Image (spheres, rainbow, N blue to C red):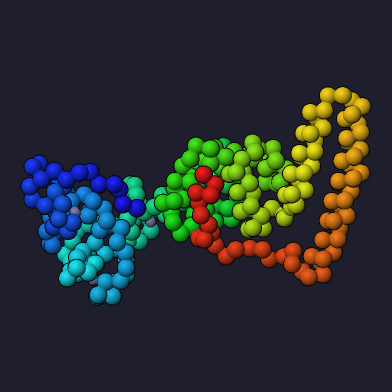
Amino acid sequence: MSRPRKAEDPIRWPVPCNRCGQHHQTVARWPDGGVCGYCYQQAKRTRGTCACGHEGVLPGLIDNQPACRRCSGIRLNIDCRTCGTEDELYSGGRCWACVLGNVVDDLLTNQATGSMANELIPLAAALKSMKRANSGMTWIQQKHVAAFLRNLAVAPDITHETFDGLPDSRTREYVRGLLTEYGVLPQRDELRMRYDRWAAEALERVRDPQNREVIRRYIRWHHQRRMNLMEVARGTFLRQTGSHRGHRPPQLAHRTWHQTA
Ligand SMILES: [Zn+2]
Ligand SMILES: [Zn+2]
Ligand SMILES: [Zn+2]
């Protein structure tokens, strides 16, 4: 996640950065020398295990190897005020994960009652637990996502019907999927629901009442009946194999957030 660099300016900044050797403004003087803004950012994001065994952010440079603050003598504020973790701070002295946690709580709390619906607690936990909290922030700060979660926070109850009543969007189906995975919403045959919705809309478009009646009967007796039979057959299969249970990923960490952008 490195920013594109501006062109060097050797006249304005005659002394080059000690780390990258380029002529940019020096933003810090560290024991290993003056560093430019780009190298400073990169140093804050360098993680690993120092030679001393310390695990965390390694902003220093000793013998060209990343080193912890203690070994390198670098003073840098990377201690989250909330959780105490050593990490790149995002805002207000807090790490990305803590800021994300606050945003999730804020969006999913019903402001009128000051509390979060019980059904939304697993969703909040899932959203907070994502590995790349900065991607999560990018996702959740999108206007349509934030608005969707706020709507959900004040929904009278969390059911598939509630979701159906909210504007159709990828965010809606994504959050519905999460709630299903975490067992808050029952599994539902989305294909079947989509078909029924499509059929209802298709019927509305037919102007002539006689034609509409013919098509309605066709849908009801041909397609829907077939789908019902298929469902009964599949239900029997699932009950016999027990495979309708336990479709539950352990964590959200493997998800890619921009899928729902
Ligand atoms: Zn540099
Ligand atoms: Zn160290
Ligand atoms: Zn934190």
Image region (quadrant) for ligand 2:
bottom left
Q: Residue 62 at x, y = what percent?
A: 17, 69
Q: Residue 257 at x, y = what percent?
A: 50, 51
In the image: residue 110, left or right of residue 79: right
Quarter of the image where one finds residue 196 = top right
Q: Residue 7 at x, y = what percent?
A: 20, 44
In this rendered view, identify the residue nearer to me: 31 or 222. Answer: 222
In the image: residue 241, left or right of residue 23: right
In the image: residue 152, left or right of residue 69: right
Compared to residue 212, the image places residue 106 above or below, namely below
- Residue at point 25% right, 47% down? 5
In this rendered view, identify the residue nearer to me: 94 or 27. Answer: 27
Residue 110 visible, this angle: no
Compared to residue 217, the image places residue 135 above or below, namely below
Compared to residue 75, the image places residue 112 above or below, namely above
In this rendered view, identify the residue nearer to me: 151 or 57. Answer: 57
Residue 172 visible, this angle: yes
Quarter of the image where one finds residue 40 = bottom left
